[in-house]
Each structure stands twice: as structure tokens, then as C-alpha cells.
């Protein structure tokens, strides 16, 4: 149980810290309008780190099923939905998190399970 908890926390920290770094380094505000090129960059960057965070979640939890990744999915999507309803401005980042990044995190866990399947 502790491994599962640590897996989800670590996966979420990877997702959040890398997201914050992208916006800090670029100088773009996450709830502001952005260019199509930056939105595409965010899509690719976020997809890579969402996959990685799902993979790390599964690696730490070592459950060999996707239950922990589904929990991680709901946490990611839940925080993004909460932010969507509470923030002013553009909501493209929250929508990406709900409809792209959270589902991709499940793929990261699935990839690891398939890679080590015996």
C-alpha cells in the first residue's frame, strides 16, 4: 500500500514539476492565451512527461495491473478539472491535462506492465 501511495505521489510530482518548469522557462502564463506553436510544444512535452510519470508510478507501485494508474489518472484529471472551474482566463492547459495527459499516463503504466510481462 505504501509503494502504491509513493508511486502516485512521485508520478504526480514528476508531472507537476516538469509542467511548472516549462512555463517558468518559457515565460508563458499557463492560464493565458498562447501561440499555436507553444500549445503544440506543450502537447508534445506534456505527453512525454505524462507517459514517464505513469511509467514511474507503475514502477514504484509494482502492481502489475493498471488500478494504480487509473487512480493516478483521476487525481490528474481531478486537479485539472478543479483548476478549470476555479480559474479565470484561457483553459487550454487544463483541457490538455484532462483529455490528453491523464490518459497518456495510463499508457505509461501499460507500457511498463507489457515490457516486464512474463
Image (tube, rainbow, N blue to C red):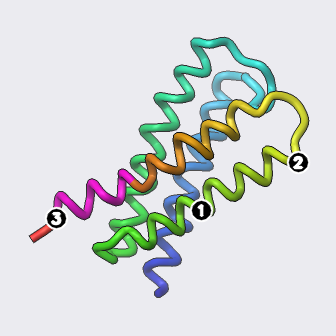
Q: Is residue 110 magenta?
A: yes
| Quarter that holds the C terminus | bottom left
At 63% from the left and 54% from the top, the residue drawn is 77
Mark 2, Cα crowd under 10 Å, few <14 / some 14-19 / many 20+, is few
Residue 116's disc is 3
Quadrant in which residue 37 is drawn: top right
Mark 1, Cα crowd under 10 Å, few <14 / some 14-19 / many 20+, is some
Q: Which residue is at the far front?
A: 99
The answer to whether marks 3 and 1 mark residues whose Cβ atoms lie closer than 8 Å is no
Figure check: 31 above or below 57: above
Read off the residue under disc 2: 86
**Front position among marks 3 and 1:** 1
| x and y, in percent, of residue 73 in the image | 54, 59
Distance between the Cα atoms at labels 2 and 3? 41 Å
Q: Quick check: 48 left or right of 65?
A: right
Q: Is residue 91 magenta?
A: no
| Helix, strand or loop under label 3 | loop
| x and y, in percent, of residue 46 in the image | 52, 37
**Span highlighted in magenta in the image:** 107-115
Residue 74's disc is 1
| x and y, in percent, of residue 55 in the image | 36, 57
Mark 3, Cα crowd under 10 Å, few <14 / some 14-19 / many 20+, is few
Figure check: 53 above or below 8: above
Which of the two discs, 3 and 1, labels the residue nearer the N terminus?
1
The answer to whether marks 2 and 3 mark residues whose Cβ atoms lie closer than 8 Å is no
- Of residues 104 and 20, the one nearer the viewer is 104
| Helix, strand or loop under label 1 | helix
| x and y, in percent, of residue 39 in the image | 61, 21
| Helix, strand or loop under label 2 | helix
Amino acid at each position: 500500500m505504501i509503494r502504491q501511495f509513493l508511486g502516485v505521489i512521485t508520478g504526480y510530482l514528476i508531472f507537476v514539476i516538469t509542467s511548472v518548469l516549462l512555463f517558468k522557462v518559457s515565460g508563458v502564463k499557463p492560464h493565458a492565451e498562447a501561440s499555436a506553436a507553444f500549445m503544440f510544444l506543450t502537447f508534445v512535452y506534456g505527453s512525454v512527461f505524462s507517459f514517464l510519470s505513469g511509467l514511474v508510478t507503475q514502477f514504484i507501485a509494482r502492481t502489475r495491473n493498471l488500478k494504480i494508474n487509473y487512480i493516478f489518472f483521476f487525481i490528474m484529471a481531478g486537479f485539472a478539472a478543479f483548476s478549470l472551474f476555479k480559474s479565470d482566463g484561457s483553459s487550454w492547459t487544463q483541457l490538455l491535462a484532462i483529455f490528453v495527459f491523464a490518459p497518456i499516463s495510463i499508457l505509461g503504466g501499460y507500457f511498463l506492465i507489457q515490457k516486464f510481462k512474463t
